[in-house]
Amino acid sequence: MKELKISTSWIRGVVGEALTPELAVNFACAFGTWAEGGPVAICRDTRRSSPMLRAAVAAGLMSTGCEVIDIGVCSTPLLSFAVRELGCSGGIAITGSHNDARWNALKFLGPDGPLLNPAKGEELLDIYHASSFAAAALTRAPAPMVEPNFEPRYLEHLLSSLDLDPIRARGFRVALDFCNGVCAGIAAEFLTKLGCTLVPVNAEATGDFAHAPAPAPANMGELARRTLESKADLGAAFNIDGDRVAFVQEKGIPLSEEYTLPLAALSRLARRPGTVVTNLSTSRMIESLAHRCGQSVTRTAVGESYVMDRGLEEGAVLAGEGSGGVAALPVSMTFDALLTLGMVLETMATSSASLAELVGQLPVFAMLKGEIPCLPDQAYRTLEYFRLCHDGRSPDCTDGVRVEWADAWLHVRVSNTEPLVRVIVEAESEGRAGSLFAEAMELARRALAGSRGAHHA
Amino acid sequence: MHKPLSLKIGMGWVRGIAGESLTPQLAASLAAAFGTWCGKGPVLVGTDTRPSRDMVTQASIAGLLSVGCAPVCLGIVPLPALQFRLRSSDAVGAICISASHNPVEWNALKFFGADGIVLRPNQFAELIDLYHQGVYPRVKAHEIADIRHDDSAVARHHECVLSAVDADLIRSRRFRIAIDCCNGAASRAAPAFLRSLGCDVIEVHTDPAAPFPRNPEPVPENLGALCRAVRESGADAGFAQDADADRLAVVGENGEPLGEDSTVALSAHHVLSRRPGPVVVNVSTSRLVDEVGCRFSSPVFRSKVGEIHVLERMLSCGAAIGGEGNGGVIYPSVNPCRDSFVAMALLLEALVQFKGTMRDLRRLYPSYAIVKQRVPCRPRDAASFLRLVRHLHRNDELDVSDGIMVRWPDRWLHVRGSETEPVLRIIAEAPTEPEAQALVRRVLDYLRPLI
């Protein structure tokens, strides 16, 4: 099977297999048609395949009459900022984000900078599938593709949303693992402005990733060691395009990426009370924290575009997911690792606490995650089986099947990015989580066996 | 009624209206097919100054990268300089993005092999087969090459062309030359080249950022501004190039075009005056070249129309010089392709040796009148039309190797289907214009019921 995933806000695939220049040209043509010829900003990450996709995307956009403004190698949140500042009709970030180096993707940003919301994304897909692209008469000289330097304005924007003096007073030492992605240069600048010392890890922007790019404890061994060795106040692992982050405590203990959103909320809700939006699969820590501040949490389907779209609709102050992606609204229109890091440093500074002490303020839950390979045609049956088994508890079927108990929840859904069914369980005690998880995995296996049987029959 | 098709696959090139039939999808796939044909390695990419150049270039770069080739971007570059660079580099091929003399809305990809020569018909057929098969050996992400840049092509090419003539001798004459680059690929290179030959240069349309000020084909009706510049500045001659700078037209010191056919004839005159040798031109080129060959006892061979046919014939007979009546001069000891820079250098050197004016040089040979006529004709109908022409001239001396060529002692008539447009081309040459007109009119009248 050729690995290609298409959603309403991105296309993602293995380069050289499903993700070809022709596919990128077609999507860029569809996007240029959708953007109605307005200026479109593009950027790329450090992957070896990104210049190829950049060329294909630029060609497609130009053929539909769009002016292409190339921001160069930079993070997705910086591109989002540029789209907003330049009043672009949209943006395309060429980045495989947290996927490994075989992959790459195009992320589509709408006007004002967020990922295309589902309604806009469906329009884009309709144009793509109809293959009726705008064809500009290319008879006048195009504006040359430039790489405007947005770093200073973007940094100023981030800094203006933070309480700088307390952070500067603390003079933090921060170990940062860039996984050879796009953020090394700008993060150094950012931390200097915050009076912090940077301990860089895997900072060379080579695109040859030192480890799997998803910010998760399994990939944070080197960072944990460097955090401890350098006596840093905290460690932070960024993904390739700088929209997700996970942290390491000062003793060198990695935190699950589920902690990123609640840690950011400590800062954000203290400064700006309001609603928090997250997805159905994210830890309940965020509810405990928000309720403590008298705020509510809204849950949506899994995916940045769903979470951000609801956040913007509800005027939320914070939106994020258990994957480590967090946006402080309306400061950022996409998840932003740099700003998230800034918010955590801010909380540590204003509350004179270490990261471990902040973590100590968060409620403790046990979370278990599992995945079961599953072909798309088996997925629906599996979910349906779960829904029937838990019918008595009125499951939430917004995105897969989610079942709640007073002390626990279970979420079973089909992955957006891989041919998998994901099973996530969270409970107040490890024992309870363990038994719910075992039960769920067994159910899933039974459902799949049934669907395979039916398939072969 | 169908819109006439603009996409045209010709000899070594694919041409269309940018954004309409020449889409980025097509360019990316063709480049991937070409990369497949060449094999992994550096591939030069150069363009003229058309507004669609970036779009087509970026698509081509993406296609090349996807199959493991390393694009080497030459930017805006005269085609002969690109071909020269190709031969002197380790590149496995090149793509030139230019629709040459076609109007601005057109663009094309032209493909060259490692020898610097446009793909031969059998090679090009292989490329198009690969394209139609549509399965390219895409490389994995970690095998994708870097994009490189090379801005040395123009300087290297200049150096080589200058070494082929007595540059000091030319400099000593301090010519005043007006040059019209049509704001095309040679807009920077051509004035600099002429200055390096000691010329006082009057620049006409040499802004690569400006749109084409005229139809890029360097035929007399498009050269008004250059003729004026020659008259007003008292220049010794005017030179006009097309957008990719492979063709050259010459304007005499009186501000009147010499006619496209003079370029190859006078270049041949100069080369043969030093060392006689075979000359190859296509069947549609003026009899002027025969007069030149006759003067220097050198044989003149005729090939089918198309640069590659002329060149192949030249290589097989060891020609001293050759080219096409449209202003394309091929001087194989410098660059085995049409090269307007070579033509300029040869003509200036000829002028020094001749010790007269450009008009006088031209007057060494008689004048012929050439009349060209286009008749709308779908490619599928061309053969029937040609059969009729053949019938009309069944009692005359015929050559049917490329359309229908009819020759008489002092005149000829050539009728062929165009490779680039859905038209039938009728060309006649005779001592006077009414005589040439009469040859064309006879064909037109005969075909009238069908047109």
Image: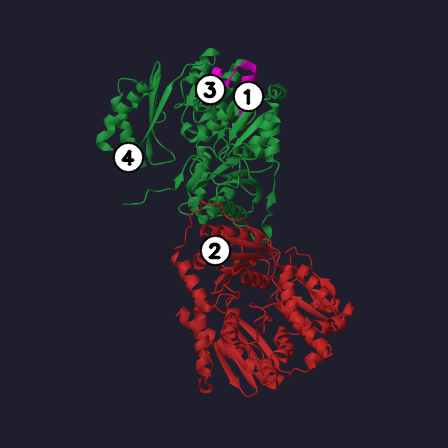
Chain colours: A red, B green
Q: Which mark is residue B381?
A: 4
Residue placed farthest to the front in the image? B232
Mark 3 and mark 1 in contact? Answer it, CB < 8 Å.
no
Q: Earlier in the sequence, mark 4 or mark 3?
A: 3
Q: Residue B244 location in percent, x, y? A: 50, 35
Label 4 Cα neighbours within 10 Å, binned few <14 / some 14-19 / many ≥20: some
- Residue identified by numbered label 2: A28
Front: mark 2 or 3: 3
Say what amino acid the circle numbered 2 marks. Ala
The chain to which mark 1 is attached is B
Is B306 situated left or right of B206 in this image? Answer: left
Label 1 Cα neighbours within 10 Å, binned few <14 / some 14-19 / many ≥20: many
Q: Residue B209 location in percent, x, y? A: 52, 41
With respect to residue A66, does B413 lie above or below? above
- Residue identified by numbered label 1: B348
The chain to which mark 4 is attached is B
Question: What residue range appears in magenta?
Answer: B343-361
Say what amino acid the circle numbered 1 marks. Leu
The chain to which mark 2 is attached is A
Q: Quick check: is A39 in the magenta stretch?
A: no
For the residues labelled 4 and 3, the Cα–Cα distance comes to: 34 Å
